[in-house]
Image (cartoon, rainbow, N blue to C red):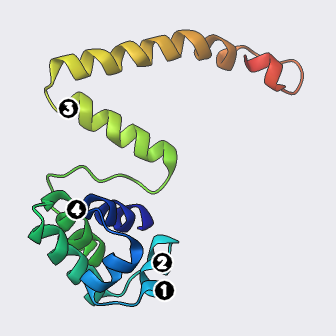
């Protein structure tokens, strides 16, 4: 959440004080949102409206999805909450995109990673694993 709000503010080239005035909220409120506090639904509407007014449609859509996640576009990839889940979903989206160069790059990275880490990860261990054993 904080990154989207900060991203919008910086895209507008405004300080937190100026951004608060643009939104019609107190400086301290914007500061709290950027620190991670969730804005109320009406603030998400305002954030989305400001983003649209400045032709930042991607940010506008992101704020709309935050307000109503169930209404998110079904064609857009959804990223699970865990970091690993996010990476897997992102990689799947890239591989399924049909972009040949992107798919080749991802496949190269995956093959390289597998060659580097798979042998150590699959090696049978007679004793508890240490970080040095996995490298």
Front residue of this view, candidates 15 and 133: 15
Against 18, residue 80 (above or below) is: above
Against 112, residue 51 (above or below) is: below
Which label sits in the foreground, 4 or 1? 1
Q: Identify the disc placed on residue 42.
A: none
Residue 18 image point, x, y percent: 33, 77
Q: Which residue is mark 1?
A: 28
Q: Which residue is mark 3?
A: 96
Residue beneath the point at 25% across and 81% down = 22
Judging from the image, what secondary structure is the residue with disc 1 in? helix
Q: Which residue is mark 2?
A: 31
Q: Residues under labels 1 and 2: Cα distance?
A: 5 Å
Front residue of this view, candidates 87 and 34: 34
Q: Which residue is mark 4?
A: 59
Q: Is residue 50 left or right of residue 87?
A: left
Label 2 vs 3, first from the N-terminus: 2
Label 3 vs 4, first from the N-terminus: 4
Q: Residues under labels 4 and 2: Cα distance?
A: 19 Å
Residue 111 image point, x, y percent: 43, 12
Against 119, residue 97 (above or below) is: below
Judging from the image, what secondary structure is the residue with disc 2 in? helix
Q: Would you say the residues marked 1 and 2 are in contact, meaning their CB atoms lie under 8 Å apart?
A: yes
Q: Residues under labels 3 and 1: Cα distance?
A: 43 Å
């Amino acid at each position: 959440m904080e990154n989207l709000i900060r991203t919008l503010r910086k895209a507008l080239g405004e300080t937190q004080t100026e951004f608060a005035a643009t939104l019609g909220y107190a400086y301290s409120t914007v500061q709290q949102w950027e620190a991670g506090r969730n804005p109320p639904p009406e603030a998400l509407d305002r954030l989305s409206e400001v983003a649209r007014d400045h032709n930042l449609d991607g940010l506008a859509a992101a704020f709309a999805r935050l307000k109503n996640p169930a209404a998110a576009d079904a064609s857009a990839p959804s990223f699970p909450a865990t970091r690993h889940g996010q990476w897997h979903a992102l990689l799947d989206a890239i591989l399924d995109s049909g972009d040949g160069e992107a798919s080749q790059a991802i496949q190269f990275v995956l093959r390289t990673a597998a060659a580097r880490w798979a042998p150590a990860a699959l090696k049978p261990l007679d004793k508890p694993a240490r970080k040095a054993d996995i490298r």
